[in-house]
Image: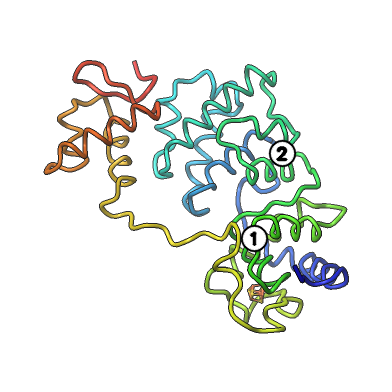
Amino acid sequence: MATSGRNDHAAFRRVLRRNATQLARDLPWIEHADPWAVLVSEVMLQQTQTSRVIAPWTKFVNAFPTPTSCANAPLSEVLRLWSGLGYHRRAKALHDAATMIRDVFDGAVPGAVVDLRRLPGVGEYTANAVASFAFGQSVAVVDTNVGRVLARAIANQTLSVGDARSTANELLPRKDAASFNQSMLDLGAQYCTSTPRCQSCPVARVCQWNREGGPDPAPRSAGVSRPQPRFQGSDRQARGRVLAALRERPRSVQHLVTCVDDNDPQRSATLVAALIADGLIEKHGQRVRLSGDE
Ligand code: SF4
């Protein structure tokens, strides 16, 4: 794979570092000293827009300031604090991760990537992000946003998963990798978006795509997200409605049918069964409640 050379990498890093302050977003978890608070933010950010994470994250870390406090609470309390974030399997995974941290890691979030990867719901991105931002380790953090920056600014070509990973590793500075990773995320979130803002981008002069032109290499690159399926009328929306109803109190099966689709009891039954199988809700006779609720 032909990517830019060592000098180009150095120039890119220099310009990125010079513009770090301009790029920095004011987010409460950035430079947070507590690895648990960082882990919570990274799990919440996996599939939810940053602006929608700020309020739930603040409530969550206030309610559960340590992994042990989260592990000791019933899952239902975690699910109540997950309101507005969607993709509720993440809430259960985070609760399971807190339990593992309490039981296996003496209540402290582990700092090694290999240990972080053992936690439920923690994949390569989240493990690297926590290792970098909470523990200052020299590991590259590559999410959707960074995937776009790498494909456009560094390679000016479509990148496979392996190419994106090796490009990110080659680019990573020896010192202060966490600040570099944060600036890459900031750049991808604010300028190098799906429709890039190259006119005002602070690294435009060292961006390969901006200099060389050609078709946008980002859309088919590794880690770059595809358009989300429609939310309105989706199972995801219906699952959210069921969980919202159960956050208030236990409900009858019949009530949940009205949350999903009055005209399709079979679809409702399938969705409720899936939520039970996911461990998010429990059925007792004809009553359904959040898992862990008394
Ligand atoms: S100049 Fe455009 S393509 Fe290059 S990094 Fe900036 S926003 Fe992305």
Q: Position of residue 144 (x, y in %)?
A: 58, 58
The residue carrying mark 1 is 160
Q: Is residue 123 above or below residue 147?
A: above
Q: Is residue 260 above or below residue 278?
A: below
Q: Position of residue 262 (x, y in %)?
A: 13, 41
The residue carrying mark 2 is 33
150 and 48: which one is in front? 150
Badge 1 density bin: few <14, some 14–19, many ≥20, Cα 10 Å: some
User: From the viewer's perspective, is 242 left or right of 15?
Assistant: left
SS class, disc 2: loop
Residue 43 sits in quarter:
top right
The answer to whether marks 2 and 1 mark residues whose Cβ atoms lie closer than 8 Å is no
Distance from label 2 to label 1 (Cα)?
Answer: 34 Å
Badge 2 density bin: few <14, some 14–19, many ≥20, Cα 10 Å: few
* Image quarter (top left, top right, bottom left or bottom right) of the C terminus: top left
* Image quarter (top left, top right, bottom left or bottom right) of the N terminus: bottom right
Q: Position of residue 132 (x, y in %)?
A: 74, 45
User: From the viewer's perspective, is 226 left or right of 117?
Assistant: left
| Residue depicted at x 73% and y 40% | 131
Q: Amino acid at mark 1?
A: Ser
| Residue depicted at x 37% and y 57% | 229
- The type of colouring in the image is rainbow
Q: Amino acid at mark 2?
A: Ala
In the orientation shown, which residue stands out farthest toward the front? 1
Residue 243 sits in quarter:
top left
Residue 11 sits in quarter:
bottom right
Q: Position of residue 282 (x, y in %)?
A: 32, 22
Q: Earlier in the sequence, mark 2 or mark 1?
A: 2
18 and 148: which one is in front? 148
Report if the beta carbon of the residue with label 2 is closer than 8 angstroms to ligand 1.
no
* Rendering quadrant holding ligand 1: bottom right
